[in-house]
Image (cartoon, rainbow, N blue to C red):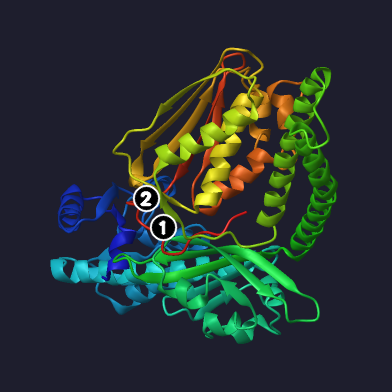
Amino acid sequence: MDDKLEQVGGKILVVDDYPANVKLLERNLQAVGYETVSAADGEEALDKVQADRPDLILLDIMLPRMDGFEVCRRLRASEETAVIPIIMITALKETEDRIRGLEAGADDFISKPFDRGELLARVKSLLQIKYYRSMLTEREKFHAVIQDLSHGILITDGQWRVQTISRRAAELLGLAHEDQMIGRDLSDLLSRFKVMPPPEALRQSTTRSVTVELEQEDAGQPRYLAGRYTRIEGPRGELYNAALVFRDVTETRRKERIKRDFLRLFSHKLKTPLTSVSARLDMLDRGSYGAVPPAMAEPVRIARENVHRLSDLIEKVLAYAALTATEIEQAGQLIPLADLVDRIRQRVAERYPRQAVRWTIAIPADLPRARAPEELLSLVVDNLLDNAVRYAGRTDVRIEVAAVEIEDRQLRVAVRDNGPGIRTEDRDQVFSDFAPGEETFTGNIGGIGLGLPTARQLVRSWGGEIDCESTPGSGATFFFTVPSEFTPAREIPERRG
């Protein structure tokens, strides 16, 4: 029996009315690793089959209450038990008795007294037949089920030869007849598309599951597909099957393009006059138009502060628009977190000169460096620190920034504040696109909620996770993960966002 068969295991039902025979059979079977159950007559045997679902039955013919022939016929009449192999153990030698057994549905015979080697060989052979018969039945059922699914489903063998392809998969890939695709190499079927990650990288990958995107932009009507490629490994870690499940996201991409174009236009239309206003206010503050009267100094300062705040908001809109339009750079620099956090802390403090903030930075000196694009990591930290100050809603603001090393030598960065916190029902919405995050925090500051969605997409771009914990009235803690210089690199990064 090969490795796959050994993994299936084997539960064997021994049916005999003579206890000594039962013990002898069970001892021989258990010695080589089979599990056994027993029955002393035909009716008990049928009950045990229903209760224990054995993989094989050793069935004596001469039984009380119901003989082995009738037991065999009843098992074969039920769809649930029809595929269970049955070996009849009998002292009958006549050919007509064996014919009668075959007609009842027996798969094989062993004569009493039996030979141990012969018994184990026949059990092993029939279990193997049953295993492959079950696999074939399940594959046929699976193929029938997937034909009506809205997702395309494609299964290959270990050499990437197509074994199963649904009608929807053939339609999405622009193939004429799915039956003609069986046996072809998966790379051939995907040749019309730009595939990310590329097919050769997928083929060589040892990552269990990878996000895949397919683009066909040179056709009259561009088509975009997205899904997952999953490896199914054999007992020694080799590729046994590969599954590609995907769906049509063309309409989604079209809507993303509309949103991106709107955000770009909206942002640039705001930024052009805002730049002019900011320049004039700066010149006014510097006295370029003459000395500023004392009564106007404070209004001018407030105006400049709000113009800069609005400029920061527009920058976030532009950053968000870029995230939905282009591929985020996956490679990163090695960044000392303590230095990065200190720079951003100073930058945030300058934005809120009237806000007294007590900062606590808890980053160990020996913490490994973060590995991520520095500009993107800076934007995430900036978003979290800025939110902590902006939505504090109190005069004694306390903010703690901590970083620790976790599993896989990743880094976990947390920003904790003593603000009003987030309501439980709002916690799942703070990372949603265009969620009114400001109202979630304080209820009295308007905004368009792009900071945290941007941070989420940035964190996911390098394979991290971002989340928050909060109790209303007791502040909130936002935390995210980022690879360190010692984190094992992902062979094929999952593309998200």
Amino acid beneath label 2: Ala
Image quarter hosting the N terminus? bottom left
State left or right for residue 145 relative to residue 259: left
Image quarter hosting the C terminus? bottom right
Calculate the distance from the C-alpha at mark 1 to the C-alpha at mark 2.
8 Å
Marking on residue 71: 1
Please determine whether, in this image, residue 12 is positioned above or below residue 5: above
Amino acid beneath label 1: Val
Q: Which residue is mark 2?
A: 45
Please determine whether, in this image, residue 28 is positioned above or below residue 359: below
Q: Position of residue 201 (x, y in %)?
A: 46, 73
Marking on residue 461: none
Pointer 1 local density, CA inside 10 Å: few below 14, some 14–19, many at least 20 = many
Residue under the image location 72 percent in, 28 percent down: 438
Residue 61 in sight: no
Q: Quadrant of residue 120?
A: bottom left
- Foreground residue among 118 and 201: 201
Residue under the image location 41 percent in, 59 percent down: 490
- Label 2 residue SS: helix
- Foreground residue among 108 and 232: 232
Q: Position of residue 335 (x, y in %)?
A: 41, 48
Q: Position of residue 176 (x, y in %)?
A: 71, 85
- For marks 1 and 2 on the same chain, the one whose residue lies earlier in the sequence: 2
Pointer 2 local density, CA inside 10 Å: few below 14, some 14–19, many at least 20 = many
Please say if the residues under marks 1 and 2 sit with CB atoms less than 8 Å apart: yes
Q: Position of residue 424 (x, y in %)?
A: 64, 23
- Foreground residue among 224 and 363: 363
Please determine whether, in this image, residue 187 is positioned above or below residue 390: below
Residue under the image location 21 percent in, 51 percent down: 22
State left or right for residue 389 relative to residue 49: right
